[in-house]
């Protein structure tokens, strides 16, 4: 059975973390275009895995994930305040290369069509 509340919460957390990244002053987050690709929320809403990607590649995404892990307490507090949560979920940040991968596919398709 689908857990619609976890899906809605996942979307809200993804949106708010993306906004928080823009507000944070850590240079590791502004080294390239850093984006929140996906959030996977546990069914009991106590844990959330956040996937981070960058246009500059996986290494930049890993640095951004480290920066976000260091600021996890701040991010959890802000999520609790902005979303009016009683308990903010524990966050785990994972780096992924999905933006770079999709840009490469788009470039290959563009070469084929030309």
Image (spheres, rainbow, N blue to C red):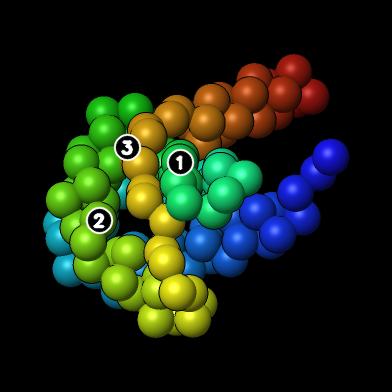
From the viewer's perspective, is residue 102 above or below residue 13? Answer: above
Marks 1/3: CA distance? 15 Å
Comparing labels 1 and 3, the label whose residue is closer to the camera: 1
Q: Secondary structure at mark 2?
A: helix
From the viewer's perspective, is residue 18 above or below residue 57? Answer: below
Horizontal side, residue 2 vs residue 39: left or right: right
Q: Give coordinates of residue 23: x percent, y percent.
A: 30, 74
| Disc on the earlier residue, 1 or 3 | 1
Residue beneath disc 1: 49
Q: Which mark is residue 63?
A: none
Residue beneath disc 2: 72
Q: Nearer the viewer, residue 60 or 87?
A: 87
Marks 1/2: CA distance? 12 Å
Residue beneath disc 3: 61
Among the 4 quarters of the image, the one containing residue 21? bottom left
Identify which residue is drawn at 60% across, 31% down.
102
């Amino acid at each position: 059975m689908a857990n619609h509340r976890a899906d809605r919460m996942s979307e809200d957390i993804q949106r708010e973390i993306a906004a928080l990244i823009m507000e944070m002053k850590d240079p590791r987050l502004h080294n390239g275009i850093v984006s929140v690709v996906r959030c996977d929320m546990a069914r009991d809403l106590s844990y959330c895995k956040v996937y981070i990607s960058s246009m500059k590649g996986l290494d930049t995404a890993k640095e951004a994930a480290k920066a976000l892990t260091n600021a996890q307490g701040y991010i959890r507090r802000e999520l609790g305040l902005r979303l009016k949560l009683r308990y903010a979920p524990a966050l785990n940040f994972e780096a992924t290369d999905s933006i770079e991968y999709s840009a490469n596919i788009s470039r290959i398709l563009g070469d084929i069509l030309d």
